[in-house]
Every structure is written in structure tokens, then in C-alpha cells.
């Protein structure tokens, strides 16, 4: 049996992944580690008709959070950004993954009671090598799940006609549905 190219597994430390909302910023940040608390610096504000109605009292704050027009503004390093929330289709889910075997993943595993590696002494050398390659091959451990993503732009709100990320998400879903359909 061939080994999978990419294996996505659930985090054994948690029973259900946490919910997250990824933000795609129009800039490059040369950092790929933990960032700590960002609440003091990153405060997106909803904008649009529905948030205005909520602010003036016509739409109560107790209204469901999913009642939104999906637009927001925020400031990052002094620059005003306009955000558009893109919801994934009902049959899709997004995951935030951490590469298996990465230093962060190993540190998380050492903090929890991870089971020790089991060695099958009756396995052939080829089976042992296949198991070792499976552990070393590409794999992601799910850290969080999401059903929407916020795409930010500088001057305008991102839309499918101008933003390559929104367009690629919409086109990828359409292409994926055609590839996997039975017609």
C-alpha cells in the first residue's frame, strides 16, 4: 500500500478543535512563531448597514452574531484596512494546521502526556521503514477549524473581480465541485 502524500490528523490533546477566524492581511510579516495577545493592537470594527443599525439601537446587540454584512475596518501599523468576510460553503471546512514534527508541535506534545513510540519487533525491515517514513512524511495536525475567513485590502474591500484570494477561493470551490461530481 502506498503512503499518503499528506496526512491531516486531529490533535490528540484536544477532543474538539477550537474555532478560529483567519485574517489574510495585505502585507508580509517576517515572523512565523507565536504572537501572544493581539487584542490590544488588532480590533476590527464592523461597518455597513447592519452594524450601523446595531450601533444606533435598531438591531439589538443580542441579535445573532451571524447577522452581518461581512465588512469591517481595522488599522494595522497606522494604515486603514478594509475587510470582507468570505464564508466557506456548507460542505467545506477550513483548518489551521501545524506541520507534524515541527519544533512547535514537538513542544506541544512534550507538555501533554503523549504515548511513547511503539516498535513492532515482528515487523519486517520494509514495514519498519514504511512506518518511519510515515512519521517523517508530510502531515498536518489540526490546531483549529474555521468556516469563514476575513480578507483585508488597503483602499477597498476585497471582492471577486479585483482580489485574487477571493476569486481563487470561489473558483477553486467551483472547480472542485466539477471534478468530484458524477456527471
Image (tube, rainbow, N blue to C red):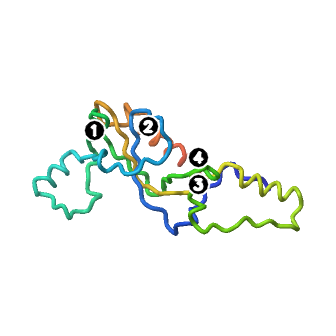
Residue 151 x/y as whole percent: 37, 41
Identify the secondary structure beneath mark 4: helix
Q: Residues within 10 Å of mark 1 (few under 14, many from 20)?
A: some
Residue 125 x/y as whole percent: 89, 57
Please give the label number shown on residue 105.
3
Q: Badge 1 is on which residue?
A: 75
Q: Rounded to the nearest whole Å, what is the CA distance between mark 3 and mark 2?
A: 28 Å
Which numbered disc flags the more N-terminal residue, 2 or 4? 2
Relative to 96, 12 lies left or right: right
- Contact (Cβ within 8 Å) of mark 3 with mark 2: no
Q: Nearer the viewer, residue 122 or 37?
A: 37
Q: Rounded to the nearest whole Å, what is the CA distance between mark 4 and mark 1?
A: 40 Å
- Contact (Cβ within 8 Å) of mark 1 with mark 2: no
- Contact (Cβ within 8 Å) of mark 2 with mark 4: no
Give the residue drawn at x 34%, y 46%.
Answer: 85
Which numbered disc flags the more N-terminal residue, 3 or 1? 1
Residue 55 x/y as whole percent: 14, 53
Nearer to us: label 3 or label 2: 3
- Where is the N terminus found, in terms of image quarters? bottom right
Q: Rounded to the nearest whole Å, what is the CA distance between mark 2 and mark 4?
A: 21 Å
Please give the label number shown on residue 165.
2
Q: Residues within 10 Å of mark 4 (few under 14, many from 20)?
A: few
Nearer to us: label 2 or label 4: 2
User: Taking 129 as reference, is 82 above or below it?
Assistant: above
Nearer to us: label 3 or label 1: 3
Identify the secondary structure beneath mark 2: helix
Residue 149 x/y as whole percent: 40, 48
Identify the secondary structure beneath mark 3: helix
Nearer to us: label 4 or label 3: 3
Q: Rounded to the nearest whole Å, what is the CA distance between mark 4 and mark 3?
A: 34 Å
Q: Residues within 10 Å of mark 3 (few under 14, many from 20)?
A: some
Amino acid at each position: 500500500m502506498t503512503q499518503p502524500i499528506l496526512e491531516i490528523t486531529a490533535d490528540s490533546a484536544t477532543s474538539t478543535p477550537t474555532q478560529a477566524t483567519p485574517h489574510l492581511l495585505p502585507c508580509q510579516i517576517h515572523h512565523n512563531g507565536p504572537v501572544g495577545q493581539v487584542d490590544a493592537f488588532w480590533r476590527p470594527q464592523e461597518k455597513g448597514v447592519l452594524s450601523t443599525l446595531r450601533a444606533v439601537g435598531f438591531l439589538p446587540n443580542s441579535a445573532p452574531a451571524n447577522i452581518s454584512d461581512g465588512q469591517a475596518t481595522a488599522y494595522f501599523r497606522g494604515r486603514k484596512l478594509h475587510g470582507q468576510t468570505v464564508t466557506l460553503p456548507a460542505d467545506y471546512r477550513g483548518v489551521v494546521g501545524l506541520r507534524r514534527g515541527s519544533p512547535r508541535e514537538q513542544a506541544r506534545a512534550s507538555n501533554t502526556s503523549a504515548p511513547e513510540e511503539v516498535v513492532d519487533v515482528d515487523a519486517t525491515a520494509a514495514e519498519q521503514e514504511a512506518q518511519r517514513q510515515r512519521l517523517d512524511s508530510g502531515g498536518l495536525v489540526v490546531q483549529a477549524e474555521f468556516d469563514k475567513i476575513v480578507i483585508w485590502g488597503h483602499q477597498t474591500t476585497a471582492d471577486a473581480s479585483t482580489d485574487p484570494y477571493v476569486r481563487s477561493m470561489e473558483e477553486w470551490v467551483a472547480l472542485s465541485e466539477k471534478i468530484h461530481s458524477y456527471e
